[in-house]
Amino acid sequence: LLPGSEEDYAKVVALLIARGTRKDVVGPENRNLAQIAAGFAGAAMLKVLLDAGFDLHATDPTGMTLLHRAAYQGQAETVSLLLERGAKIDAKARDGCQALHFAAMGGNAGAVKVLTAKGASLVATGTFKATPLHLAVNLNHLEATRILLEAGAPPDALDAEGGTPLMRAV
């Protein structure tokens, strides 16, 4: 988005939708407007789109939900909004990853904190049987690693290769 407040952009989108603009357009990687907004436009914009009828549980071609996209991009406020609206915290993308995996991969401490506080699984495995802690450690995301450990993530969990998070850090 260009400079301007998130709320102003949300108001512009609401105005366009109220005037009957097409909502079925898709953007890069065949994602609809809500899928794009979940990662980049913020909670105010996504609220407008959800209120206009966009599907909370829609997935993109990779199986990522709005919650996955917001978690990966570090949109903690959007993650909270989606969970309040009923997004499934344990929904899996095609690779088996859940929202907490995506937040950990992105190193997004705010999203990790929201998801762990709301009960996201610390032991769920996704790609290569990796837990969110494996991913945070492997990608050197210190704050996300700290939050996951404080939330009780098992430091000795084994991934598909028999590796622990410590092994992935070395």
Image (cartoon, helix red, strand yellow):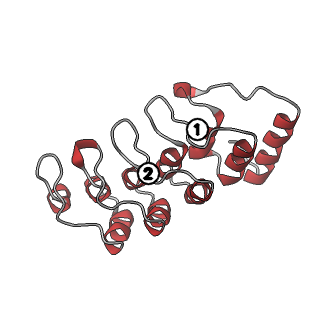
Is residue 95 rendered to the left or right of residue 59? left
Q: How many marks?
A: 2
Identify the element where label 2 is drawn: helix
Q: Residue furthest left?
A: 162
Q: Are marks 2 and 1 in contact (CB under 8 Å)?
A: no
Q: Say which quadrant the C terminus sits in.
A: bottom left
Q: Position of residue 105 (x, y in %)?
A: 37, 51
Between 23 and 111, which is closer to the camera in this rendering? 23
* Residue drawn where x is 34% and y is 74% of the image: 150
Q: Position of residue 43 (x, y in %)?
A: 66, 53
Label 1 CA crowd tier, 10 Å (few <14, some 14–19, many 20+): many
* Residue drawn where x is 31% and y is 72% of the image: 152
Q: Which residue is mark 2?
A: 99
- The answer to whether 39 is drawn above or below residue 81 in the figure is above
Q: Which residue is mark 1?
A: 35
Kind of residue at badge 1: Gln
Q: Position of residue 168 (x, y in %)?
A: 18, 55
* Residue drawn where x is 56% and y is 30% of the image: 31
- The answer to whether 32 is drawn above or below residue 49 in the figure is above
Q: Is residue 5 visible?
A: no
Is residue 69 rendered to the left or right of residue 150? right
Q: Position of residue 154 (x, y in %)?
A: 24, 67
Q: Is residue 89 visible?
A: yes
Kind of residue at badge 2: Ala
Quarter location, residue 137:
bottom left
Q: Earlier in the sequence, mark 2 or mark 1?
A: 1
How far, Cα to Cα, is label 2 from label 1? 14 Å
Q: Say which quadrant the N terminus sits in.
A: top right
- The answer to whether 157 is drawn above or below residue 10 in the figure is below
Q: Residue furthest right?
A: 19
* Residue drawn where x is 53% and y is 49% of the image: 70
Is residue 144 rendered to the left or right of residue 126? right
